[in-house]
Image (cartoon, grey):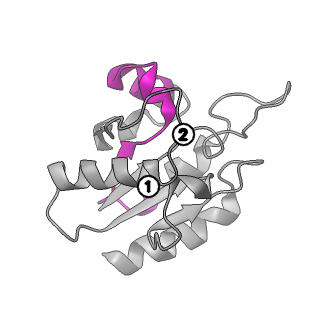
Amino acid sequence: MILFLDFDGVLHPFPMGPLDKPFSATGPLWKILENIPGISVVITSTWRERYSFSELIELLVAHGGKRFTERFLGVTPILESTTDYVPGIRQREIESWLASNVPENASYLILDDIEEYFDSNCKNLYLVDGVTGLTENDIGTIDLWLRSQV
């Protein structure tokens, strides 16, 4: 099972205010990974355009997730220019990663805060409130969905 993970709006509020800190909402992510030992993570965030995979992992695990380091598999491909926006693009990037890396019909869940990055019929999308990022309230719903896929 794969969890596709965005950063901005999921692991911290977006846009960030003067009192917000990057990766302030990683606690709920660590609880999800702890609750579902068989889940692996692929990063979909635009941060992958500026940082290498190993740098992204260092940034993440510096916020309490060192024990989950090996559960991070990689990043999705970049299928658009960094200056253009294409509706549904993040879904295309995820589909491309899935086609290259896992068997057809693999179970996955997408954590993101921007609905326009996906088709309207994207059934594996969990929209996080970008104003807060992941919260304790999200954990139960996400856990339920993930457990139903095992």
Determine the residue positioned at 44% across, 68% down.
124
Give SS at disc 2: loop
Q: Viewed as shown, does residue 25 lie left or right of 121?
A: right
Determine the residue positioned at 59% across, 42% down.
26
In the depicted view, which residue is nearer to us: 77 or 60? 77
Determine the residue positioned at 50% across, 32% down.
46
Task: Tell me residue 132's x, y (percent).
Answer: 75, 48
Going from N to C along the chain, the mark reached first, 2 or 1, is 1
Task: Tell me residue 73's x, y (percent).
Answer: 27, 41
Give the residue type that dot 1 points to: Glu
Task: State which quadrant residue 102 falls in.
Answer: bottom left
Give the residue type that dot 2 points to: Tyr
Q: Viewed as shown, does residue 75 lie left or right of 122?
A: left
Q: Does residue 6 lie above or below 83 as drawn?
A: below
Q: For the magenta stretch, what is the residue range?
A: 33-59
Task: Tell me residue 71's x, y (percent).
Answer: 31, 44
- What is the spatial separation of the Cα atoms under label 2 and label 1, in whole angstroms? 35 Å
Residue 56 inside the magenta-drawn segment: yes
Residue identifier under label 1: 34
Q: Viewed as shown, does residue 37 lie left or right of 63?
A: left
Residue identifier under label 2: 85
Task: State which quadrant residue 150 falls in.
Answer: bottom left
Q: Does residue 145 lie above or below 133 as drawn?
A: below
Q: Quadrant of the N terminus?
A: bottom left
Q: Does residue 1 lie above or below 31 as drawn?
A: below
Residue 126 inside the magenta-drawn segment: no
Determine the residue positioned at 41% across, 55% down.
91
Q: Viewed as shown, does residue 41 lie left or right of 143?
A: left
Task: Tell me residue 15's x, y (percent).
Answer: 75, 35
In the depicted view, which residue is nearer to us: 44 or 57? 44
In the depicted view, which residue is nearer to us: 47 or 136? 47
Front: mark 2 or 1: 2
